[in-house]
Amino acid sequence: MPTITRLLPETAKADAAPLAPREGATKLAPVDGVRFAAVEAGVRYQGRLDVMLAELAPGSSVAGVFTRSATRAAPVLMCERHLKILPAADAPFAILVNSGNANAFTGKHGDTSTDTLATALADRLGCPATHIFPASTGVIGERLPHDRIEAKLDELIAGLSAENGARAAAAIMTTDTYVKGASTTCDLGAPVTISGIAKGSGMIAPDMATMLVYIFTDAAIARPVLQEILSELTHETFNAITVDGDTSTSDTLILGATGRAEMKRIETRDDPRVQVFEEALHAVMLDLAHQVVRDGEGARKFVEIAVSGAASDASARRIGMSIANSPLVKTAIAGEDPNWGRIVMAVGKSGEPADRDRLTIRFGDVLVAQEGWVAESYSEDAGAEHMKQDEITIRVDLGIGGGTDTVWTCDLTDRYIAINADYRS
Amino acid sequence: MPTITRLLPETAKADAAPLAPREGATKLAPVDGVRFAAVEAGVRYQGRLDVMLAELAPGSSVAGVFTRSATRAAPVLMCERHLKILPAADAPFAILVNSGNANAFTGKHGDTSTDTLATALADRLGCPATHIFPASTGVIGERLPHDRIEAKLDELIAGLSAENGARAAAAIMTTDTYVKGASTTCDLGAPVTISGIAKGSGMIAPDMATMLVYIFTDAAIARPVLQEILSELTHETFNAITVDGDTSTSDTLILGATGRAEMKRIETRDDPRVQVFEEALHAVMLDLAHQVVRDGEGARKFVEIAVSGAASDASARRIGMSIANSPLVKTAIAGEDPNWGRIVMAVGKSGEPADRDRLTIRFGDVLVAQEGWVAESYSEDAGAEHMKQDEITIRVDLGIGGGTDTVWTCDLTDRYIAINADYRS
């Protein structure tokens, strides 16, 4: 397993984020060819960083994965368009993100805002507007005051530095309780760095509706290969987590590869170095995904749900998500209740093939149920002991096929209700 | 609209059930050919009614609809089998229900319990065992102490009376906060009564996992016609409600028609009286379904979600359920927050065809959003005023087709968490 260095949250409030990283680095490992800047633009929040710029060197390969929501926000639609256009060889790329306003469900005004900002930034950086990848996160349905961001573009460009990754991670937070970053290295003939930042904890607080993830590497990889790798790894990382089953209108994941490492460029998927890169990238993506769950609204428990013996991998995923999204399972975990009856219920309601009498359930290593009934060896004390931990593992074997999958979630606590039932104003 | 008389809850605690009926009758309207009894058998609860018996006269038509869960409980599997067997002409039917233990995920022991009870009851009533329709509701995964129920069968039979419907409704409660019953009449050439009882509020408290509904009529209707009507009306009543999106292992809906009314039997679906009967039955089913939502765990608001302009009726149902099951929508309602951004999110994540710029959203009669943005006429005060009511209506028009559907749910409050995170013991 590649070694991951997490960004150490300076801002974590111990009470609000009981699952926040306790060790890590105060800076994000720099990536050759990537520079960051962050400023206070007062989009909505006052007195904190709320706009970040990341610039990638000319010749970079950029790949992206986005929300499948039918009500995608304007910046998401722009990113999707720009990824389809062949980039210019000698111009940089840029990622421009604001927090405080999601520029979602803003009609034609939303497109005007993203167009204005992309054009203004591209002019200053000397690249086509199609090299700009924007995102916005915050309140839905309010017009983005893009002039406040435009007024800060020169300051952002002047402040660009390879050392500013942690500041960028802070600028994209909304109601996250801590910054999220992770880095690793791998050897692709030359030493290569992979560093990523993320924000989000599900659909977050009242109108804050986004998971944003930006990952950078100095590896040299052709864009089609990069996109293929990213799409595949997303399935088993960011698409395998859930906080509340609600899907944002703005979810954005961008991976940029600058090609600055002293290596021959990876041109095809069957290059043997792809596997090394995938393993390292997977570790960074999975760690960032877990950090998002650990900062899930009101979360006090981190929960892994491993499904095996299902009719297919896809069936295992749906069964895992049925368990992970069940309010009754999640409240039981919050109550430290080894309530395996609710696991049975969630398997049953998934709509997937299952046989009551072949089902096996374990909490951690404790065998709870098998052959359609509670296991003879099971003691409620052993189950309860596992549920007291911060990190819970639920293993479900369907006993009918070879399908496996693992998903991650958090518990559902009274704090989730308190956070989300608060009036917006 | 047929007039519905609800069963007036004597047991409702005003604080626990703010949406309980405030007027109605203390007795369930008797149905000719149906008798009820209820006893204290001490299955799990002490000092309260926990077993009910309903007997239907020989010649009755019985129809049923059950949970589609892949982990259905033993009594559900028995009901499904018995419905497929042609009944004997001159023998009564019986419904036997206990609360306190769900006889679910009890392996082969579960089947032994239902077999034993069905045989013992059939012997005493002089009918084939295939005339018995059992149900159990309560803790999952514990062996049903069926001897305690068997020991009470003679007492139950001796106590049978047409007047005992309300006692039967009380005996099947688990953590329901009040009894649920509804009656109406219609004219099918002769006056006909329809009376039903229900229990449930989603997956209810810790291990209490069932919605049970029993409806009786003295109408004379052939079994295939009765089953067809019941199945169709279930789609727009009990299958159109959700408390928490969790599906029980035991959901059971039985409709018995004794044929005692002075009418010519309805033999085919095209009999013009079918429409009259359907309208009356629909009203009873919908009222009982709404009562279940109103007793939803921790519910303080009753929410109707009316979807129109969707690609199809099925698409409208999925969009309605995506909104109704969204924790973010439900917590916003609990907080009396007219948070239409979350409605947009829930439409977007449903996976159904939608166009952001054609979406119209109303809270009650207040136009909130149209043409992809907040309506010019909208004021937050008007939206907030609607959200303060006990009964909320959310109207969503997709603007892309003719599909419509309506679903009902309740809000998600801190009491839901408190109820479900409590340890079982």
Image: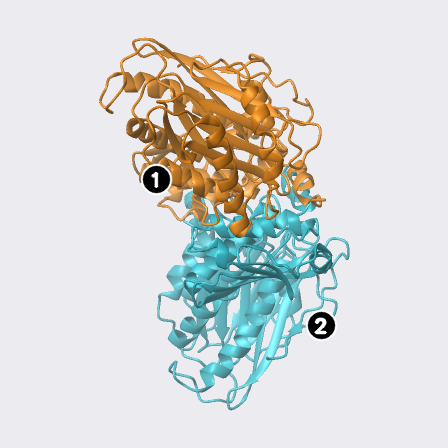
Chain colours: A cyan, B orange
Q: Amino acid at mark 1?
A: Ala
In-image side of A351 versus A409 (left or right): left
The quarter of the displayed image where residue B205 is located: top right
Q: Looking at the picture, tell me which residue is in the foreground, B399 or A344.
A: A344
B62 relative to B417, above or below: above
Q: Which residue is mark 1?
A: B314
What chain does mark 1 sit on?
Answer: B
State the quadrant of the C terminus of chain B: top right
Q: Which mark is residue B31?
A: none
Q: Which mark is residue A24?
A: 2
Q: Residue at x 40, y 72 (%)?
A: A228
Where residue B279 appears, x then y in whole percent?
Answer: 35, 19
What chain does mark 2 sit on?
Answer: A
Counting other residues with Cα less than 10 Å from the Cα at mark 1, is it few (<14), some (14-19), or many (20 or more)?
some
A119 relative to B259, above or below: below
The quarter of the displayed image where residue A65 is located: bottom left
Where residue A10 appears, x then y in whole percent?
Answer: 74, 64
In-image side of A31 versus B371 (left or right): right
Task: Look at the numbered disc 2 and give the secondary structure of its residue.
Answer: loop
Whether callout 2 and callout 1 share a subunit is answered no
